[in-house]
Image: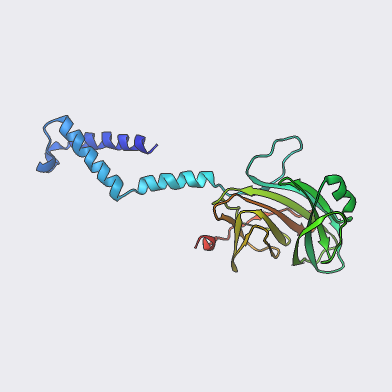
Amino acid sequence: MAFTNILSEEKNAIAFVAVNRSKVPNALNMTTMEELRAAVLVFLAFGLISCPNSLHAQATAVYAHDHMPTRCVDVPAGEKRPEFGCFKVGTARGLQFSESKIFWQLWTFPDRATAEQAKSANGVVVEEDGRVWVSEFGPKGIPLRGGERIAVIGPIQLLPAKSYDAEIAYAVMRPGARSQVHTHPGPEAWYVIAGEQCLETPGGSARARVGGSMFVGPKVPMELDVTGTDVRRALAVVIHEPGQPFGISSDWKPTGACWQ
């Protein structure tokens, strides 16, 4: 792409000099097309070395195309899921809690049958990253038989509601990728399975690495960036009142704090 532009610029420059030969200084007042062509090539080469704005712009455009903002989507049953992206993988509906602050507990089980038998009425089973995961929501010390507790995330502050839906997403994102700038109608929490993430909000930025977690309150504008050099894999949950959307686009402008 860059070389095509160079050749085009060369032809335009030669045509300009040929037409305006009388205005060209003596040092460039060439008598042959070969000499003229050589001079123009030197000029263009110097311009590309000293002022590489056009090449930089092209490189930036390619990078932006490869790292388009990611949003979490539903994948219809039977449809092959892309290698990279954020995908809604499970939902617990009509959850009711006696406390306004709850915990998200993550467990792994050797197989789905064992997980389904062990989970509570509020639990959700998903199979991702080669493991069977159970998400439980409620008090901190919910015991499950036959599994290994991986993380306890919270306390997560809920907005007042009669009941809640907990939507779980699984994301696989390349280094340098980012989410759309967005908000959620309820709190969101993450558990990082692989790689590293950085979350920027109007309040600042925070990072989580493999085995780490974070959570943020409802209606907070945010952008999630994949920092580090490894592919980031993570589970996330958004807990909101039934009937509300998973996420909403926001016009808030991040400062790029995750890359500073």
Left or right: residue 170 compared with residue 255? right
In this rendered view, identify the residue nearer to me: 145 or 95: 145
Using the rendered view, name the quadrant where residue 48 is placed: top left
Left or right: residue 104 compared with residue 26? right
Q: Residue furthest top?
A: 33
User: Relative to residue 153, is residue 63 depicted above or below?
Assistant: above
Protein image colouring: rainbow
What residue sits 45% from the left and 48% below the top? 60
Residue 149 visible in the snapshot:
yes
In this rendered view, identify the residue nearer to me: 63 or 143: 143
Q: Residue furthest left?
A: 26
Q: Could you tell me residue 62's position as x and y percent?
A: 47, 43
User: Relative to residue 38, is residue 187 depicted above or below?
Assistant: below
Q: Could you tell me residue 249's position as x and y percent?
A: 63, 54
What residue sits 58% from the left and 51% below the top? 230
In this rendered view, identify the residue nearer to me: 170 or 210: 210
- Quadrant where the image shows the N terminus: top left
Residue 242 visible in the snapshot:
no
Q: Could you tell me residue 246's position as x and y percent?
A: 72, 53
What residue sits 67% from the left and 49% below the top? 171
User: Relative to residue 80, is residue 63 depicted above or below?
Assistant: below
Left or right: residue 51 compared with residue 236? left
Using the rendered view, name the quadrant where residue 19 is placed: top left
How many callouts does the rendering have?
0
Q: Could you tell me residue 114's position as x and y percent?
A: 87, 48
What residue sits 73% from the left and 45% below the top? 130
